[in-house]
Image: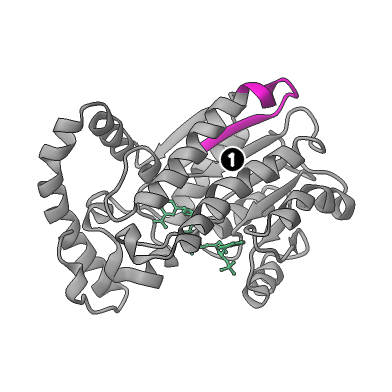
Amino acid sequence: MELADRVAIVTGASSGIGLAVARMLVAAGARVAMVARGLERLQRVCDELGPKAIAFPLDVGDLAAVARLPADVVAKLGRLDIVVNNAGVHHRGDMLRHPADKLATMFTVNLVAPVVITRTAADVMPAGSVVVNVASLAGKLGVPGSAVYSGTKAGLRLWALAASDDLERRGIRIGNVNPGPVDTGFFDDDFDNVSALTFSQPMVTPEAVAERVMQVIHSDRTALDLDIPYTSGKLATISYLVPGLGRLLRPMLERKGAKAKARYAERRGQLPRSGDAPR
Ligand SMILES: NC(=O)c1ccc[n+]([C@@H]2O[C@H](COP(=O)([O-])OP(=O)(O)OC[C@H]3O[C@@H](n4cnc5c(N)ncnc54)[C@H](OP(=O)(O)O)[C@@H]3O)[C@@H](O)[C@H]2O)c1
């Protein structure tokens, strides 16, 4: 896809993976509707990216506002060609730690909002447009300590793969990018409750994930479902298909992950605390 003068929505654009995607889109000549809740940080990154980055402050958990977003973007920027559903939330640990409404919010933000944006975007996007979801390897293999998050990301992936037929009838492509651990601020909220298993896989940069998002945007195929790292994706698929093997590997992966988590904590200037033992 030629990106000069195309218009994209990127949710969760003020940090991490979303910011890396927005940078690449702007560098390729696209204009980007930058979505996040915190206005100050959002405005700061828009100022940094220049006039092609335009702030659309919004909580994607507000489904009425999310439904209006594609039409609002077309009204302000003239067209809409790309939607990157990237904003996500993860309330970590045993699901019984959290009240029910907090668990429901994860589904609203991670799964329902992308469905709603895509549905209303499809009415205003021309043929040749594309939707990309940032899902997770946790959506390929349920991660203990991330049960609800895993459910939201598995739902996101499967919805997109099934919806590809419906969207194709309008000439719109859809695809997923499924990262393992990514070096962003995503773990900082509740580091103690990030499972050791999460850290057992090689950590990648937000830029490497953004490259995969760009790969989906530039591809002429629909229903792409790209894992990063590739080998971690294959390990997740095999463990899903052969649960006995997954159970066998888990203690070894948890030991490896606990060490990687401690190294990461040290690097981020955080002291490992009592909850950092393998789960
Ligand atoms: N980091 C990882 O290890 C990892 C691994 C696999 C998948 N992922 C997925 O990658 C996506 C991006 O994560 P990240 O690591 O880049 O996180 P991040 O650095 O924490 O960035 C999250 C972005 O989303 C915005 N955001 C959060 N909740 C929002 C909401 N309700 N409405 C609008 N914007 C919202 C945040 O800004 P405000 O707070 O100002 O709204 C911020 O711009 C998420 O979907 C996550 O599940 C991450």
Image coordinates for residue 42, horizontal then vertical, percent: 65, 70
Q: Nearer the viewer, residue 66 or 7?
A: 66
Q: Is 172 one of the magenta-colored residues?
A: yes
Q: Is 218 one of the magenta-colored residues?
A: no
Quarter residue 184 falls in: bottom left
The magenta-colored residue range is 165-176
Instruction: State how many labels appear.
Output: 1
Instruction: Name the residue furthest front.
Output: 100
Q: Quadrant of the C terminus?
A: bottom left
User: Is residue 117 rendered to the left or right of residue 51?
Assistant: left
- Quick check: 215 above or below 181? above
Question: In the rendered image, which residue does mark 1 sit on?
Answer: 132
Quarter residue 6 falls in: top right
Quarter residue 59 falls in: bottom right
Q: Is residue 220 visible?
A: no
- Residue sitting at x 75%, y 35%: 122
